[in-house]
Image: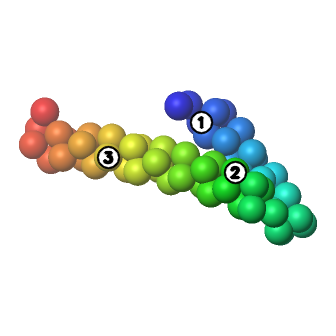
Amino acid sequence: MNSKQFFEAVVKLRELQKDYFKTRSSMALAASKRQEKFIDDEIARVNTVLSNKNKQGELGL
């Protein structure tokens, strides 16, 4: 995922969250939680990539 795709995914998350707080529907909550997990998974993936790059740099690779 590139930075533009990540930005668009976060925008979608905020829209879903706003919809949930407006409606308090279980469907809106489920959609919001799915998108939040998607964002959290991408953050974890990027953190892993960055951590691996830092480790390689420390090893002089």
Closer to the chain start, of discs 2 and 1, is 1
Eye-nearest disc, 2 or 3? 2
Disc 2 is placed on an element classified as helix
Q: Are marks 2 and 3 in contact (CB under 8 Å)?
A: no
Which residue of the protein is positioned furthest toward the front in this rendering? Answer: 26
Is residue 17 shown to the viewer in this render? no
Residue 26 located left or right of residue 5? right
Instruction: Identify the amino acid type marked 3.
Output: Thr
> Residue at horizontal 18%, vertical 46%?
55
Up/down of 16 relative to 2, above or below: below
Q: What is the x, y in percent for residue 19?
A: 85, 58
Q: Are marks 3 and 1 in contact (CB under 8 Å)?
A: no
Specify few, some or many for label 3: CA neighbours under 10 Å numbering under 14, 14-19, or 20 or more.
Answer: few
Query: Residue 29 versus residue 47: which sits nearer the camera?
Result: 29
How many marks overall? Answer: 3
To which residue does mark 3 refer?
A: 48
Q: What is the x, y in percent for residue 37?
A: 54, 52
Q: What is the x, y in percent for residue 59?
A: 9, 43
Question: Where's the C terminus, which quadrant?
Answer: top left
Instruction: Identify the amino acid type marked 1.
Output: Ser
> Residue at horizontal 82%, vertical 68%?
24
To which residue does mark 1 refer?
A: 3
To which residue does mark 2 refer?
A: 31
Tell me which corner region of the image, top left, top right, bottom left or bottom right, holds residue 18.
Answer: bottom right
Disc 3 is placed on an element classified as helix
Instruction: Identify the amino acid type marked 2.
Output: Ala
Is residue 4 shown to the viewer in this render? yes
Tell me which corner region of the image, top left, top right, bottom left or bottom right, holds residue 49.
Answer: top left
